[in-house]
Amino acid sequence: MTDSFPILGFDHLEFYVGNARQAASFYETFFKFTNTAYRGLETGSRKVASYVMEQGKIRLVLSTALNSDHPIARSVLKHGDHVAVIALQVPNVVDAYQHVTARGAISAERNSAGIAAIPPTLAEDESGLLHYAAIHVYGDVILKFVDRQDYRGVFAPQFQPRHSVQPGWEAGLQTIDHIVGNVEWGAMEHWVKFFADTMGFQLLVHFDDAAISTEYSALMSKVVQDGSGQIKLPINEPALGKGKSQIQEYLEYHQGPGVQHIAYSTHNIIETVTKLQQAGVEFLRVPTPYYKELEARVGKIDESIEQLAELGILVDRDREGYLLQIFTQPVEDRPTLFFEIIQRHGAQSFGEGNFKALFEAIEREQALRGNL
């Protein structure tokens, strides 16, 4: 596979939230992130306050508006706390931006929250030059290109470093494995084509409603990725079923398409999930019979099945190896955003063998919410 332009990896994800100080405390306390940088009134930022949270190679930016007229405030009013920006590191922002806009990406229009995409922009302070640009993708999500080659600061101009690192504090989260977007019925093909046409991404795998369905609900999903395989973007759309699918529930409460969940990789999922559960993170659970047939289904694995069952970790195998995964409950009052923890032992798939058990677990939660 060959990219249309080089992508070095995920740079950061920016969340728009109602109260960034409280959100930072949540991600620090429950998910063991460290606050490494801050901007706000004290640093000269008069409209937005932001906290940079890091763990492994994962960087989250939690941003809140300082007045109700700001586009971030309007976006949070519409969607609740949500992932607003997916930022990718590139070696040349101008080349990346010109390439995608020449092939149909929208650069000038504002989205429904009033947030405009960004042409190539240069930000400068005593730490150097930071280049960035952004385009619109599904819903109100912005895809941002960032070049840090000439910038030596903690994150970006107006940000000041924070020193809250505690030895042994992290939970073992390493990288962003993939980011899943939910779009409305009939829109999945459009966005698969968008990423193919504008960025040269290719289709990695396709799951139809026969593979991802239960008695009550179904969805369809396609996964696109860049040439290196670092950037994986599954895209889901709802399919017809007896009840309301998790995708339709998301679309209603998020009020449109957006990022449904983020998968974080770890080198030791048992240790990571144990730490997160001890910190108070709530995970989806599958019935214990799932584990009685586990070894017969996936073969020998390195981990203890008893420990996996105790923690609720799922296992699946493909031709390259096996993976372990677990999903949190939604982390907002709205049943929208959640996280996945994943450990890959060679497998490059997404746990197709777990879909039925996982979706039944999600449906039990939907039923409790009165949304099935």
Image (tube, rainbow, N blue to C red):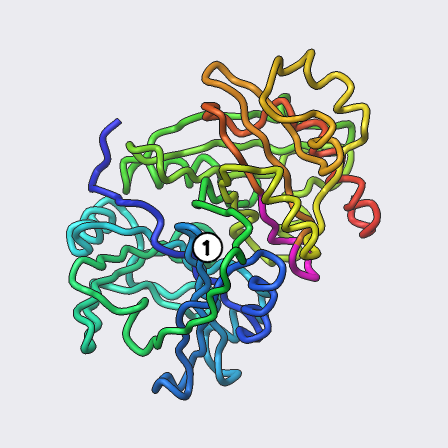
Q: How many labels, in total?
A: 1
Residue 336 located within the stretch drawn in magenta: yes
Q: In which quarter of the image is residue 304?
A: top right
Q: Name the residue under label 1.
A: 55
Direction from residue 59 to residue 246 in the image, left or right: right
Residue 297 showing in the rendered view: yes
**Relative vertical location of residue 304 with respect to residue 151 in this rendering, above or below:** above
301 and 10: which is toward the camera = 301
What span is colored magenta in the figure?
A: 331-340
Q: What element carries label 1?
A: strand
**Whole-percent x and y of residue 194?**
35, 41
**Whole-percent x and y of residue 190?**
42, 39
Residue sitting at x 28%, y 64%: 118
Residue sitting at x 49%, y 59%: 167
**Relative vertical location of residue 348 with respect to residue 67 in this rendering, above or below:** above
Residue sitting at x 70%, y 53%: 278
49 and 95: which is toward the camera = 49
Residue 185 located within the stretch drawn in magenta: no
